[in-house]
Amino acid sequence: MKLSVIIPVHNCEAHLADAVKCLQLQDFADWEAVVVDDGSTDATPQIADGLAQKDVRVRVIHQPNGGVSVARNRGLDEVCGDWIVWLDADDAYVPGALRRISELTNANAACNCLQFPYNTIQPDGSLHPCVPSAYSEFGGKSYPGLEAFDILFARRNVGGMNWQPWRFVYRRDSLPRFRTGVIHEDMDVLPLQLVGFSRVYIAKEPLYAYLPARAGAATETFTPRRVRDILDVTAHVYAQLDAAELPKDVRRGFTSTLACNLFGFYLAAPGFPEPDRTELLDAFAAHPEWLRAIDWPPRTAWLKRLILRVLGVRLTARLVGRLTGYKGFHAGRKG
């Protein structure tokens, strides 16, 4: 079998049938879908079983609720395909995506994985391409793993978080394993894994349609626990940097990406609950290298150094978050 699609799902009765339908409507038939029902308490188990009865390419695994990492790992244990992808139950692959993935894997069989940009699903159902310059400038060819890591996660033009599992296609012998019991499991393992790969293909075209307002799948909505987990995962990734033996400029760029992710999405976000904001500020105070790692545009780098020296990390983080809303920090290196 050419392609396995893992669908982790938890209480997503409104979307699961549409997710499977988007696969059935593809102009490529050599696929299987492994639906991992992660302890759903709505009608999701019955819907999944009904889909499997109507299409032999759909298999269903029922398990107690363990979280998205457990569900994804279980799917990895069950798949039969030569190449593996993920599909969240409230998302979709664009028409022709599986055929295109098959073409790319055939042409890049020596690559450990492929990576691509995506579309966001708008309220009116239309698709908006999300193609950062890392893809428009460097997409359409394969790179050694370290160089692909640099392009996608360490340079100025990375364009945000590029490590969601559904943006990867993995060769069967190169599959990741997710650390269980934490949210942000993708950031925890997927970026640094690329460093050890022989080759990685970066695609130009968006093949996936992502629904920004998460309505289901096995992902979790916001809870105070996300604060502890983003700190835990960030610290865990930082701890792996020494073992990765990255070149100095690549390490600095990736460190800036991590710090920008933590700062921009969890500290400077409007309406973030104050107790959780305080916990994050305390973390920045305990790890001043996180804030110092954020690359400002070269002409204002002196200002960051001055503010840090005068106010300290905690007050600097609060000031910058309120004044800027985190825009324009990750200047990084030129691609």
Image (spheres, helix red, strand yellow):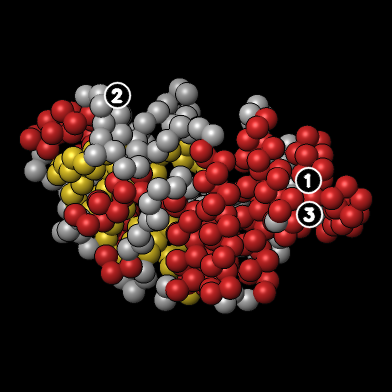
Front disc: 1 or 3: 1
Q: Which amino acid does label 2 sit on?
A: Ala
Percent of width and height locating residue 246: 59, 74
- The residue singled out by tag 2 in the image is 14
Percent of width and height locating residue 127: 45, 34
Judging depth in this view, the residue of 187 and 15 nearest the camera is 187
Q: Which amino acid does label 3 sit on?
A: Trp
Task: Give the residue displayed 39% in from the left and 61% down from the top.
Answer: 114
Q: Quadrant of residue 203?
A: bottom left
Badge 1 element = helix
Q: Quadrant of residue 275?
A: top right
Q: How far apart are marks 1 and 3 (CA)?
A: 17 Å
Residue 66 falls left or right of residue 271: left
Q: What residue type is labelled 1?
A: Arg
Q: Which mark is residue 314?
A: 1
Mark 1 or mark 3: whose residue is earlier in sequence: 3
Determine if residue 152 is in view: no
- The residue singled out by tag 3 in the image is 296
